[in-house]
Amino acid sequence: MKHAVTYEHIHTCKQSGARLGKVHTPHGSFDTPAFMPVGTQATVKGMSPKELEEMDAQIILSNTYHLYLRPGHELIRQAGGLHKFMNWNRPILTDSGGFQVFSLSSLNKISEKGVEFSSHKDGSKHFLSPEKAIEIQNALGADIIMAFDECIPYPADRIYTKNSLERTTRWASRCKETHKNIEAQSLFGIIQGGMYEDLREQSLKELVALDFPGYAIGGLSVGEPKEDMFRILSHTVPLMPEDKPRYLMGVGTPDYLMEGSISGLDMFDCVLPTRIGRNGTVLTSKGKLIVRDSKYADDFSPMDEECTCYACQNFTRAYIRHLIKADEVLGIRLTSLHNLHFLLNFMRNIREAIRNDSLLDFKLKFNSAFGYK
């Protein structure tokens, strides 16, 4: 069977074991390891598609749950799919909506059939099953779509975690049976299992037996200590298929992106760059900077002197602080643009370091400058 999305391995870093690759999709290819900006409601907040292309965002993510509630997947299907609807011609990944159902909604009932929930917007009742999640994502038309899974809370006991992952496997099988658009979209399975290494291994084996074209690690970055995340990654990633994309869901801070890349992962996503940008916080080569703070009121230097983004090349901290304090939209557009540029450039540097077999050297240099211990 020929899948719509395939992985090409290019190089393994001799120093760290991280891998350089390329993922091929019907809407073009993207280099890995890759950070995917999140466009929850068919837009990366505050950014136009042109701006994203100019900063070389090669793939973005949109959210099934939110687009199902508004404007509705049938409307997007009528528009010709998500690519045409939002005028984005590069690859798109849509999540299944599972995380949002469990984190945003008033949950009524989980059953083998699916999840009955109340909308966080208006309280209306809805039912999301594996079949419905695939129906919605087929209508949206993203290149990569995700199987419907249960994202369990942290912490969760072993019995609950085991029962949940086994249901997630059964749901994944139903997703695969429902998904028929295999020439245009590839369906990835999601590994669950909480903080239990053997349950992660069980989940992975069950999903690999279903032969998905790619695999994601879900249920991390949900409040667990950093050490637990890295422990699960170090156990799970080496067991994942080498010839398919490996995706860590919901991760976007530089330290997690670095460690995830070193672990051998290929894809990451997070709302962090635009979320903290809206709060007046930016990532710089010397660490985080809260540009709305009063001490920058008369600071006429750029947010980051080493940055080549439009915001840093044209505006000062004082001006951007003024915009934010005056509630001018341009202020948070500029901070968001900078943060996205920063993380995308960070991933380019990671890929270059992998190519040069020097990722651990780059990590030490970056951590020292950024302020990580």
Image (cartoon, helix red, strand yellow):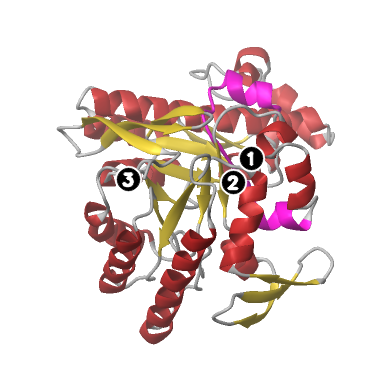
Return the x and y of residue 37 as percentages of the image width and height: 57, 38
Q: Nearer the viewer, residue 15 or 82?
A: 82
Task: Determine contact: label 2, label 1, CB under 8 Å.
Answer: yes
Q: Is residue 305 magenta?
A: no
Q: Is residue 163 above or below residue 371?
A: below
Magenta-colored span? 48-69
The residue at the point 69 percent across, 39 percent down is 81
The residue at the point 47 percent across, 60 percent down is 176
Residue type, label 2: Val
Tag 3 or tag 2, which sits nearer the N-term?
Answer: 3
* Numbered disc 1: secondary structure: helix
Q: Which mark is residue 369?
A: none
Find the distance from the CA under tag 2 to the CA under tag 1: 6 Å
Residue type, label 1: Thr
| Quadrant of residue 167 within the rendered picture | bottom left
The residue at the point 34 percent across, 37 percent down is 7
Q: Which mark is residue 274?
A: 1
Tag 1 or tag 3, which sits nearer the N-term?
Answer: 3
Find the distance from the CA under tag 2 to the CA under tag 3: 18 Å
Q: Which residue is mark 3?
A: 259
The residue at the point 57 percent across, 57 percent down is 96
